[in-house]
Amino acid sequence: MERVIIHVDMDYFYAAIEEREDPSLKGKAVVVCMYSNRGESGGAVSTSNYIAREAGIRSAMPCKLARSKDPDAVFLPVRKPFYEDVSANVMEILRSNADSEEAFEKISIDEAFLDITESCKGDYETAKEIGLRIKEEVKEKERITCSVGIGPNKLIAKMASSFRKPDGITVIGPEDAEGFLKPMPVKKLWGIGKVTEDKLSEMGISTVEELAAFDVMELISTFGKNKGMWLKQAASGIDDSPVKERTATDQIGRMASLKHDSRNENMIFSLLEELMDDVMEKVRTRKVSFRSVTVTVIFSNFKTSTKSRTLNHAVNDRDILSQNAREMMSQFLEESEINFRRIGVRVDNLHENTGQKSLFDF
Ligand code: DCP
Ligand code: MG
Ligand code: MG
């Protein structure tokens, strides 16, 4: 059966999370900035919502320049640990929609590949339904949108997901792949950087169609064997690389909002227990152990705070998770007087369980 691959990329990810957390941002230009240690005057734009993009604001642009493009935009500092928790929730939704635990590959904080060949039995209509279902599930559970690309390999799926954004879905069947790629400028081909783009331009190649038609021996003599062959294949829409998680070095986490902002210990600890149940279920199905535990609290004023502990060795033990997470949560309660809005628990530093039995198995 021909493979069917889905690529999912979250829309304006960091800014979308900020919008979700503060409804008063709706309709405004939102820019998330990575400030340097010189404060607001330094720093670069991490991302911005689509309203800000209309004013010409782009990722990696100096924040100062962004401010001059839209003085009314709302500028917010990056809250990376919080975005990582949201990412972990999204990734668990995506992983659960892949053919198997292994048919999943996270490639950045906001995107992943899923092999769904078996789930859709190679049928693109069914694949589209799965794509739409994933979009719904992410929207319902995390209240943010994503864009989905579906294709016969990772390269096509990846390029399809950025074709319609935000909140888009693009399906490129095997017979459409060539036509889809042909008119694109070579720099849009996934994997081609600025240096390669410039070299190709010197050779008179500017579109994917021109690259696909170019003599492969000439490409090899300029770029070397591996890269030369890869360029020729990629331009022809060929990509045999498998969807596969490289290591279990990512994280498993869950976050949820309290029924209402509160410092009530019963409410906070019972939600924490529920979240830990979910985390442990995933730890077991993925057959991993963890070496660190992180607890996150988002306060009613939207400030986020995290505490982490590294354990002496990797475990997959519910009691050890619980003991550490509860202690850190108690510290949070002691240290602050503000109500809690959301809490999260996460395990990282994951190790695949190799043959050795864990306490849980006995
Ligand atoms: N990011 C960053 N600095 C960059 C690019 C990205 O910090 N130069 C962060 C912020 C983004 C996140 O990574 O929200 C994901 O990057 P994407 O390229 O997927 O961009 P977005 O998700 O923000 O927008 P899009 O809707 O175009 O995917
Ligand atoms: Mg994105
Ligand atoms: Mg991305």
Image (cartoon, grey):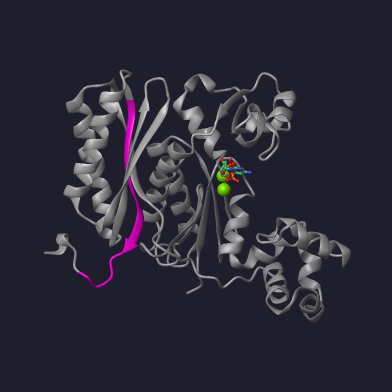
Give left or right: position of 188 versus 81.
Answer: right
Instruction: Tell me the residue at 33%/62% (across/down).
Output: 351
- Depth check: 70 or 50 in front? 70
Quadrant of the image occupied by residue 193 = bottom right
Quadrant of the rendering where the C terminus is positioned: bottom left
Could you tell me if residue 183 is visible in this image? no
Q: Nearer the viewer, residue 115 or 23?
A: 23
Task: Give percent across and percent down for residue 180.
Answer: 69, 59
Q: In the displayed structure, does residue 165 sit left or right of residue 104? A: right
Q: Position of residue 181 (x, y in %)?
A: 70, 61
Q: Is residue 348 magenta?
A: yes
| Left or right for 269, reference 90 | left
Vertical order, 358 against 148 (above or below): below
Instruction: Work out which residue is located at the far bottom of the displayed protein and give it.
Output: 217
Residue positioned 23% across, 42% down in the render: 324
Q: Nearer the viewer, residue 345 or 37?
A: 37
Foreground: 144 or 294? Answer: 294
The magenta region covers 341-356
Using the rendered image of the protein, determine whether residue 290 is visible from the camera's viewpoint.
Answer: yes
Type of secondary structure dominating the magenta stretch: strand
Image position, residue 120 (x, y; %): 43, 62
Q: Residue at x 24, y 73 (%)?
A: 355
Instruction: State ligand 1's quadrant.
Output: top right
Residue 231 locus on image (x, y percent) = 71, 70
Could you tell me how many numbered marks the image carries?
A: 0
Magenta stretch holds residue 7? no
Residue 275: quadrant of the picture: top left
Q: Is residue 49 above or below residue 360?
A: above
Which residue shows up at 47% across the image and 51% down it?
A: 131
